[in-house]
Image: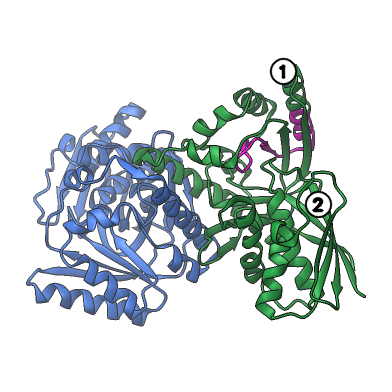
Chain colours: A green, B blue
Amino acid sequence: MRKIKLKIPATVANLVCGFDILGMAIHEPYDEMEFKLLETPEIIIRHKDSFGLPEKPTENVAGVVLLKIQEYLNLKKGFEVIINKKIKPGSGLGSSAASAAGAAIGANELLGNIFTKEELVYFAMFGEELASGVKHADNIAPCIFGGITLVKSSNLIDIIPLNSPDLLVTAVHPQVEVKTSDARQILKKNILLKDAIEQWGNIAGLVAGIQNNDFGLIGRSLNDVIVEPIRSILIPRFNDIKENSLELGALGGGISGSGPSIFMISEKEEIAQKIADMMKSVYNEIDIESFVYVSKINPSGIKIIEN
Amino acid sequence: MRKIKLKIPATVANLVCGFDILGMAIHEPYDEMEFKLLETPEIIIRHKDSFGLPEKPTENVAGVVLLKIQEYLNLKKGFEVIINKKIKPGSGLGSSAASAAGAAIGANELLGNIFTKEELVYFAMFGEELASGVKHADNIAPCIFGGITLVKSSNLIDIIPLNSPDLLVTAVHPQVEVKTSDARQILKKNILLKDAIEQWGNIAGLVAGIQNNDFGLIGRSLNDVIVEPIRSILIPRFNDIKENSLELGALGGGISGSGPSIFMISEKEEIAQKIADMMKSVYNEIDIESFVYVSKINPSGIKIIEN
């Protein structure tokens, strides 16, 4: 019986000014998933980690994706999946997307690569729907395509893989809870046209900078005048972390997903590491436990590490 | 005495979803300007055309740009400029920007190329200020840099020249008046966040499409959900022109600047020409005179044609 093992990266959605459209894969943290194809139509999910996530397939993010694939293909076979989750649920680093995208890629690999990447996104979005109530591809797309991705539309699955600039990402996950629903509700339904224009100037600059590997332009464009000023109040010491990071030489950064994780992009390993140390000590000062990750932008997304 | 002659292209600002940030140079129509350096500090402006534009330097778009350059350099020399304007004032095709940018480039050439392109934009914006009350670089930037340009900020003159895809532009100028002030006033100050997100997804797609020469992506991204639905009501038969163009095979298009000109982008000369014929006949039907132009996107902007 064929077995495979996947390494599934964390992802950063809502890339500063690219709220709801731009996401990015990183290397650290990452989940591992082991897959076995079963001759019976069972779906068996087991967790090696201790997050206490449900293992019943209809209640598990990976489970519902596998059930959808089974249903779509009218498949008489099943899957056994062992998940070793290291991307903490609720971190804002694409934990549910990792399980959902991993399930889609794992099943596809065992079935002989029968689906396109867009189809894998389609299936994986059922996992996101279970996790958050919304079928969105912001984290799934970079997880599957790698690098930085533009999700022009989740409805029509119009995903544009952008470039993957050779840059470092420092992410900190402070152990506080930010509910996605709160993060959504706090946003204003109406915004000023002049702010929107500033935002889309930054988005245009960011995409051009990403495509041209123009790091200066990326830095000048990593500026969110609409969402960050509101959502950042939910994250302790956000402004300090951001200001300190810029002083240490970060190109820019912001809230990862809907938080509470914060990420910062920089050109050099040395700067990325200094930012990591600073983040850790800022949260130590106020007795909030935190996890800090430093890695490059991940150009390839999910990797099959045992085949 | 050295004389030069410039060919200065029309420009399309507010490139569909890229309201206030993206502009594009085309080949047709274009202005001509002849420059002579004078040993006395006079500024002499003359028009070969019959638009009746003021020739007094302080009241002329080119004149104020030359006066600014003179003042900046404390220059004891002057300029004689003969303008043959073919880009009709009030067309929405960058007529004032052509005079302003032409003046800056012409003076710079006669003075031995002492300014950067950004500095030329800086001087040319004084001409736009005279014409419209606002120092903006939306048309000046593509006129000076060529191709498609992103103006991330007019205040700091942050201009990013994008690619110049090998595409055709059909533009129609119906002989109706749309005052820039009306076109501005009609816009709402507040917009829905969800519309803004759709718009910036399109902008991101458009910039990625332009940079990658992905014409399909350009077509899917040429969609403005914020400004066009409001401003288009000021332009007779806008919706017919747009729908017909898309049926004929246009990638997309919209209002040029603040109108009344409409432009459509297509991949093939044959389609661009069919769109031109259609535009002409739509306005003929309702007895509105119109001028139609077909040309490629202009990769180089202003050209010195006699030196």
- Residue on which the image places disc 2: A31
The kind of secondary structure element at disc 2 is strand
Say left or right for A38 vs A129.
right
Count of numbered circles on the image = 2
Magenta stretch: give its range. A251-276
Q: Distance between the residues labelled 1 and 2?
A: 29 Å
Above-or-below relation of A202 to B245: above
The kind of secondary structure element at disc 1 is loop
Crowd around label 2: few <14 · some 14–19 · many ≥20 (10 Å): many
Residue A46, x across and y down, in percent: 84, 57
- Residue on which the image places disc 1: A286
Q: Which residue is drawn at 20% across and 48% down?
A: B183
Above-or-below relation of A242 to B172: above
Above-or-below relation of B95 to A114: above
- Whether tag 1 and tag 2 are in contact, CB under 8 A, the answer is no
Chain containing the residue with disc 1? A
Query: Of the residues shown, which amino acid type is indicated by label 2?
Result: Asp
Q: Which residue is drawn at 30% across and 74% down?
A: B245
Residue B167, x across and y down, in percent: 42, 70
Chain containing the residue with disc 2? A
Query: Of the residues shown, which amino acid type is indicated by label 1?
Result: Ile
Residue B7, x across and y down, in percent: 31, 58
Say left or right for A115 vs B121.
right
User: Are the numbered discs 1 and 2 placed on the same chain, yes or no?
Assistant: yes
Q: Which residue is drawn at 68% across and 61% down?
A: A145
Crowd around label 1: few <14 · some 14–19 · many ≥20 (10 Å): few
